[in-house]
Image: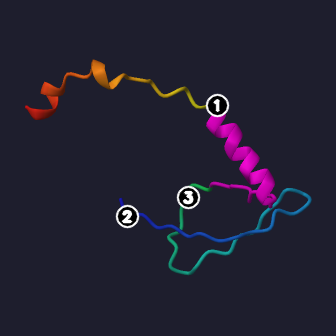
């Protein structure tokens, strides 16, 4: 399958319509379109708070005592 991709920035109008002009070498026919809204600008403080929330949502890392390790496994 011959893949072509074209990335561009568009403006979504108030009526929720978008007009896109593709390059002349873009093949005619059915195509897949994905719309991703641009993230809103956040202050550094908000970005850090969002990162902290994401980290807090991660599961705790397991704690393994070094004494419980079989060091023989390291040298096989």
**Residue neighbourhood size for the residue with mark 2, other residues' Cα within 10 Å, grouped as few (<14), some (14–19), many (≥20):** few
Q: Is residue 58 above or below residue 29?
A: above
Q: Which residue is mark 2?
A: 2
Query: Residue furthest toward the top?
Result: 68
Query: Which quadrant of the view contains residue 30?
Result: bottom right
Mark 2 or mark 3, earlier in chain: 2
| Residue 52 sits inside the magenta stretch | yes
**Magenta residues, as a range?**
34-56
Query: Which quadrant of the view contains residue 3?
Result: bottom left
Q: Is residue 1 above or below residue 48?
A: below
Q: Which residue is mark 1?
A: 57
Q: Nearer the viewer, mark 1 or mark 3?
A: 1
Q: For this view, does 75 lie left or right of residue 5?
A: left
Query: Marks 2/3: CA distance?
Result: 12 Å
> The C terminus is located in which quarter?
top left
Residue at disc 1, secondary structure: helix
């Amino acid at each position: 399958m011959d893949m072509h991709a074209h990335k561009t920035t568009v403006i979504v109008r108030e009526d929720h319509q978008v007009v896109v002009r593709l390059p002349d070498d873009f093949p005619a026919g059915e195509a897949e379109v994905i719309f991703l809204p641009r993230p809103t600008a956040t202050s550094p403080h908000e970005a850090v708070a969002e990162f902290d929330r994401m980290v807090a949502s991660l599961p705790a890392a397991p704690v393994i005592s070094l004494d419980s390790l079989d060091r023989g496994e390291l040298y096989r």
